[in-house]
């Protein structure tokens, strides 16, 4: 493998925090009102799920849907919705544009979020926010965390909350530093399979972590809410499986009970959790405690991005040029 394979994605993982400050300065109260529907495709759909969970955590009525559902079944997906937030890195994905037109035809206000100043969404959305965070690669890395940062900050502004001190410089490097030695050890022998467990605002993050492993390395993955994993899926757990448990402090009793049971079945369990709430185990990536648990998604996804990149490299694949993927999906 060429030494430079995957270098672009690796740099994006390491330096994405520099985009967050600008995104926070652009944060504003969303131009649409609740009940909110967050809409996207692929990684942007997982962003939508995370944003909807954060919105609910802040007291808003909110849900998420893939753009294809909005376009093909608007009567069901838009039932009771007062405002729609469309998320698309490129702003040119076919399903998103079709969804935007569908929503507008029903008279529901649309706020679009993208990383492309030339987006076609300008023609169909009531308001468009453009963030300077395009990755320049197929896989979403800094665009994912930066758009999530903006969504969370804007929801907080809608609630009238102050952002000062919530997102401090150096937090992302601290998480990355915590994750690097552990990730190196995890991929020393390529895992049989990787399982991602997350609930509430971590479920979309778990799905995004799994997608990154699929996109860059093509490795077998599963993703579930932690307690749902008990209901059948864990019958397949065996030696050689790696489980990423994205823990939430208010769900610790139920989530912690999973760890011993998974380890008995042969899995290696890695926790991502805020410092101070971690268990007495060595396989832990610590989130700095200055960020509220509800809003720690941009930090929690970084170890999963690094793990996916490391798996791909260990398998001799180029994360900068994943197989069978395009940056923008368009329907002919």
Image (cartoon, rainbow, N blue to C red):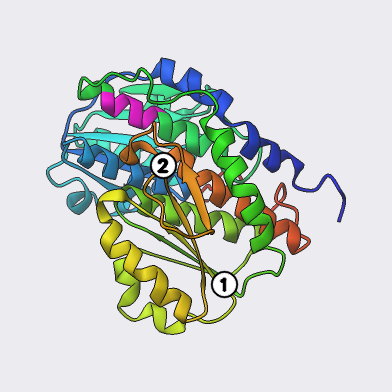
Number of residues whose C-alpha sits closer than 10 Å to that of mark 1, classed few (under 14), some (14–19) or many (20 or more)? some
Disc 1: which residue:
193
Coordinates of residue 285 in the picture (x, y in percent): 51, 50
The structure residue drawn at horizontal position 51% and vertical position 59%, both measured from the top left corner, is: 210
The structure residue drawn at horizontal position 24% and vertical position 37%, both measured from the top left corner, is: 55
The structure residue drawn at horizontal position 43% and vertical position 55%, both measured from the top left corner, is: 206
Coordinates of residue 212 in the picture (x, y in percent): 56, 54
Q: Is residue 152 magenta?
A: yes
60 with respect to 258 (left or right): left
Residue farthest to the bottom, as pictured: 235
Q: Is residue 113 magenta?
A: no
Residue farthest to the left, as pictured: 80
Q: Choose the circle earlier in sequence order: 1 or 2.
A: 1
How far, Cα to Cα, is label 1 from label 2? 23 Å
User: Who is closer to the viewer here, 2 or 231?
Assistant: 231
Disc 2: which residue:
297
Residue farthest to the front, as pictured: 280
Which image quadrant for residue 258? bottom left
- The correct choice, above or below, for 7 with respect to 28 in the image is below
- Please identify the quadrant where the N terminus is shown: bottom right
- The correct choice, above or below, for 245 with respect to 135 in the image is below
Report helix, strand or loop for mark 1: strand
Report helix, strand or loop for mark 2: helix
211 with respect to 54 (left or right): right
Which image quadrant for residue 175? top right
Which region shows up in magenta? 150-156
Number of residues whose C-alpha sits closer than 10 Å to that of mark 2, classed few (under 14), some (14–19) or many (20 or more)? many
Secondary structure mostly seen in magenta is helix
């Amino acid at each position: 493998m060429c030494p430079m394979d995957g270098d672009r994605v690796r740099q994006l993982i390491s330096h994405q925090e520099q985009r967050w400050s600008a995104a926070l300065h652009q944060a504003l109260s969303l131009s649409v009102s609740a009940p909110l529907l967050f809409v996207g495709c692929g990684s942007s759909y997982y962003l939508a799920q995370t944003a909807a969970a954060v919105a609910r955590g802040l007291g808003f009525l909110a849900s998420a849907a893939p753009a294809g559902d909005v376009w093909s079944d608007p009567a069901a997906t838009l039932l009771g919705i007062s405002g729609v937030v469309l998320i698309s890195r490129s702003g040119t994905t076919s399903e998103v544009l079709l969804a935007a037109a569908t929503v507008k035809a029903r008279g529901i206000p649309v706020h679009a979020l993208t990383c492309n100043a030339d987006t076609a969404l300008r023609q169909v959305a009531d308001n468009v926010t453009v963030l300077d965070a395009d990755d320049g690669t197929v896989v979403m890395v800094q665009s994912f965390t930066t758009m999530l940062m903006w969504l969370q900050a804007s929801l907080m502004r809608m609630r009238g909350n102050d952002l000062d001190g919530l997102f401090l410089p150096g937090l992302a490097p601290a998480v990355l530093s915590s994750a690097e030695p552990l990730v190196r050890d995890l991929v020393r022998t390529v895992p049989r399979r990787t399982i991602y467990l997350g609930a509430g605002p971590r479920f979309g993050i778990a799905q995004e972590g799994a997608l990154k492993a699929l996109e860059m390395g093509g490795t077998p993955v599963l993703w579930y809410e932690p307690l749902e994993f008990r209901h059948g899926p864990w019958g397949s757990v065996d030696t050689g499986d790696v489980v990423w448990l994205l823990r939430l402090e208010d769900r610790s009793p139920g989530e912690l009970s999973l760890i011993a049971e998974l380890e008995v079945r042969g899995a290696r369990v890695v926790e991502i959790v805020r410092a101070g709430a971690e268990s007495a185990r060595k396989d832990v990536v610590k989130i700095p405690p200055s960020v509220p648990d509800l809003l720690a998604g941009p930090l929690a996804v970084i170890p999963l991005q690094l793990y996916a990149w490391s798996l791909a490299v260990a398998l001799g694949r180029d994360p900068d040029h994943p197989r069978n993927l395009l940056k923008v999906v368009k329907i002919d």
